[in-house]
Image: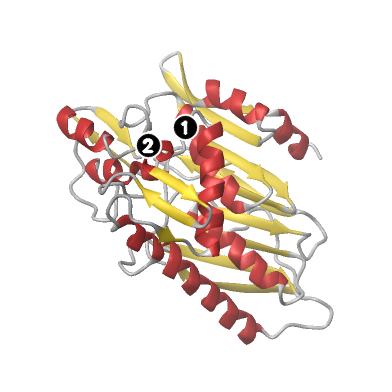
């Protein structure tokens, strides 16, 4: 898949921070989704055919591309986006599962997680066509908002999807990469491997333990656009993990900074103080979606939603003290329990 990368990434060296690779580790890496992927696995006692695993990984990634890539004109999502209003479309099993998960997050995030922001993403210059980034006219935002709104623009009837507007466009960048991570995890498990870590552009699934018998050690990046450093390292096992941030993908105009994180109600970039959100949950797809949703709503409302949904979430806010900008973290109870386990 091409360019399903999004926002910020969990910053890692070969996706592993503070974790020495043991002799029993198997490392596979490559390019996908406009970014890189890394698989680190502890070989099972019976051994493993690396070539067969690589072939299976390549096939899985190609299948995800055929379904989820907004940059592939023949993909399933591209064909959906090209549909006229009220034209039934029979969804693949994978696309149905993804849209059902997206709808659940949409409904429980004050409707701020919204796949139909595609026209607005393009308008602000953050989309597939990558036009010149600039602040659009108010009238242009108002026009594009008419086709936006996941609850109103999309109808799921069994395995069939119907769009309410010709111009409704779905972007899967805030959930598709996590879906790809989970697909690779399933592929690796099919080879009898139980201890592994998969990372695509910062989205992660970690299973079992590393070669040293420890949870996989994953670093969370300080959300600073000027430098790269680790804020903390977390032991992760049998969970998906994703970080969404506003500090890598943005532009400035007339002294004002505009990030690619858009508020689904206003159609404009968010302006609150939250710089990044990290979420750990049952799989990478949901972690991907929830990290975006919670970043859109910001820390104050986001903490309420995360606690209600029993999510392990870490919010990092920008705070100015004595004229100096610093970062402050806020963790949900679930995140604290993982951090101290």
Q: Residue at x 36, y 28 (%)?
A: 265
Callout 1: SS: loop
Image quarter hosting the N terminus: bottom left
Q: Nearer the viewer, residue 96 or 282?
A: 96
Q: Is residue 322 left or right of residue 84?
A: right
Residue in front for this viewpoint, 51 or 118: 118
Residue 60, percent from left and from top:
54, 73
Please say whether residue 299 is visible from this viewpoint. yes
Q: Is residue 332 above or below residue 87?
A: above
**Which residue is at a point 46% across and 39% down the rendered structure image?**
245
Other-residue count near label 2 (Cα within 10 Å), few / some / many at <14 / 14–19 / ≥20: many
Can you say whether 31 is above or below 45 in the image? above
- How far apart marks 2 and 1 lie (CA) works out to 8 Å
Q: Residues within 10 Å of mark 1 (few under 14, many from 20)?
A: some
190, 43: nearer the viewer = 190
Residue 317 locus on image (x, y percent): 51, 26
The C terminus sits in image quarter: top right
Question: Is 298 situated above or below 88?
Answer: above
Where residue 48 appears, as percent x and y from the top left, is 73, 82
User: Is 312 situated left or right of 287 in this image?
Assistant: right
Which of pointers 2 and 1 lies earlier in the amino acid sequence? 1
Residue indicated by mark 2: 149
Q: Residue at x 34, y 40 (%)?
A: 260
- CB of mark 2 within 8 Å of CB of mark 1? yes
Q: Pointer 1: what residue? A: 111
Residue 44 lies, in percent from the top left, at 80, 76
Q: Looking at the rendering, which quadrant does residue 78 occupy?
A: bottom left
- Residue at the image position 58 percent from the left and 58 percent from the top: 15
């Amino acid at each position: 898949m091409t360019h399903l990368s999004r926002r910020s990434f969990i910053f890692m060296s070969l996706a592993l921070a503070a974790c020495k690779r043991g002799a029993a580790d198997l490392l596979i890496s490559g390019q996908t989704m406009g970014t890189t992927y890394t698989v680190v696995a502890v070989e099972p006692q019976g051994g493993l055919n690396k070539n067969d695993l690589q072939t299976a990984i390549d096939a899985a990634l190609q299948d995800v591309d055929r379904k989820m890539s907004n940059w592939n004109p023949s993909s399933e999502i591209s064909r959906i986006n090209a549909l006229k209003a009220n034209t039934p479309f029979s969804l693949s099993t994978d696309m149905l599962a993804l849209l059902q998960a997206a709808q659940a997050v949409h409904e429980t995030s004050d409707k701020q997680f919204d796949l139909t922001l595609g026209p607005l993403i393009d308008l602000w210059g953050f989309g597939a066509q990558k036009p010149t980034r600039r602040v659009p006219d108010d009238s242009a935002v108002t026009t594009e908002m008419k086709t936006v709104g996941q609850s109103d623009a999309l109808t799921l009837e069994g395995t069939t999807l119907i769009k309410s507007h010709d111009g409704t466009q779905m972007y899967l960048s805030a959930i598709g990469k996590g879906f790809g991570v989970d697909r690779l995890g399933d592929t690796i498990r099919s080879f009898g491997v139980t201890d592994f870590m998969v990372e695509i552009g910062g989205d992660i699934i970690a299973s079992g333990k590393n070669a040293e018998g420890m949870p996989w050690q994953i670093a969370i990046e300080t959300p600073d656009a000027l430098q790269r450093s680790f804020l903390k390292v977390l032991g992760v096992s049998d969970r998906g993990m994703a970080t969404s941030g506003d500090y890598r993908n943005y532009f400035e105009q007339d002294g004002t900074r505009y990030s690619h994180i858009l508020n689904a109600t206003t159609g404009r970039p968010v302006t609150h103080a939250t710089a990044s959100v990290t979420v750990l949950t049952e799989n990478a797809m949901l972690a991907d979606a929830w990290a975006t949703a919670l970043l859109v709503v910001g820390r104050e409302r986001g903490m309420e939603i995360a606690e209600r949904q029993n999510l392990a979430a870490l919010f990092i806010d920008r705070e100015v003290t004595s004229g100096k900008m610093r970062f402050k973290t806020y963790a949900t109870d679930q995140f604290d329990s993982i951090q101290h386990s």
